[in-house]
Image (cartoon, rainbow, N blue to C red):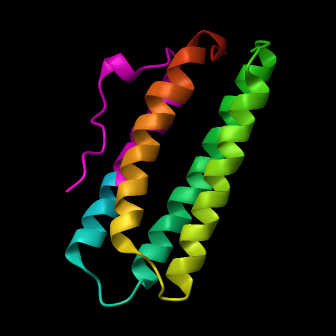
Amino acid sequence: MPNIPKWSHSLSVRNPRLDEQHIILIELSKELVELVARGPSTDEPIHRLLKEFSDYARRHDELEEGLLAANDCPTLAEHRRVHRAAEAELDRWMASASTESLDRTALVAYFQGWMEHHLTETDMPVSGYMHD
């Protein structure tokens, strides 16, 4: 089973609201990986969980981008681009799940990579711009 990052203080962006959202995203990712491992007979429950994750991630991205904008983050445009690309990828996964054409192995690998990338490569470098 892929290694979804475990929350630790080393992943903190020093904003309690964003940290709490990151913890929830990690937990939703783990839930998704566990669901796929159980091997449901259809992709419908996976689609539902992907939708929940996607909705939550979009709200998280909105808060994050608002804080970065309010704090004049010089890489805000790149951060937004990364968010839009991730949202588009989630839309593609949901579309595959809705048509029962989901590559479950690739989905699990994607979530492992996304969580690691989002936390360590996308957010940590700009954590100084994420204060309220």
Magenta stretch contains residue 15: yes
Quadrant housing residue 65:
top right
Magenta stretch contains residue 89: no
Q: Which residues are magenta?
A: 1-29
What residue sits 36% from the left and 72% below the top? 104
Q: Position of residue 79 (x, y in %)?
A: 69, 31
Q: Position of residue 11 (x, y in %)?
A: 38, 22
Whether residue 11 is visible to the viewer of this picture, yes or no, is yes
Q: In this view of the protein, which residue sits in the foreground, 23 or 1?
A: 1
Whether residue 17 is visible to the viewer of this picture, yes or no, is no
| Image quarter hosting the C terminus | top right
What residue sits 71% from the left and 23% below the top? 67
Describe residue 81's horizontal placement relative to residue 118 as left or right. Answer: right
Number of numbered discs on residues: 0
Describe residue 95's horizontal placement relative to residue 66 as left or right. Answer: left
Q: In this view of the protein, which residue sits in the foreground, 28 or 78?
A: 78
Q: Position of residue 20 (x, y in %)?
A: 45, 33
| Image quarter hosting the N terminus | bottom left
Q: Does 94 appear above or below 29?
A: below
What residue sits 61% from the left and 41% below the top? 60
Describe residue 118's horizontal placement relative to residue 129 as left or right. Answer: left
Q: Does 102 appear above or below 115?
A: below
Q: In this view of the protein, which residue sits in the foreground, 81 or 21?
A: 81
What residue sits 66% from the left and 42% below the top? 83
Quadrant housing residue 78:
top right
Q: Does 77 appear above or below 26?
A: above
Name the residue at the top extreme. 128
Q: Position of residue 110 (x, y in %)?
A: 43, 55
Q: In this view of the protein, which residue sits in the foreground, 81 or 66?
A: 81
Q: Does 44 appear above or below 105?
A: below
Describe residue 77's horizontal placement relative to residue 35 as left or right. Answer: right
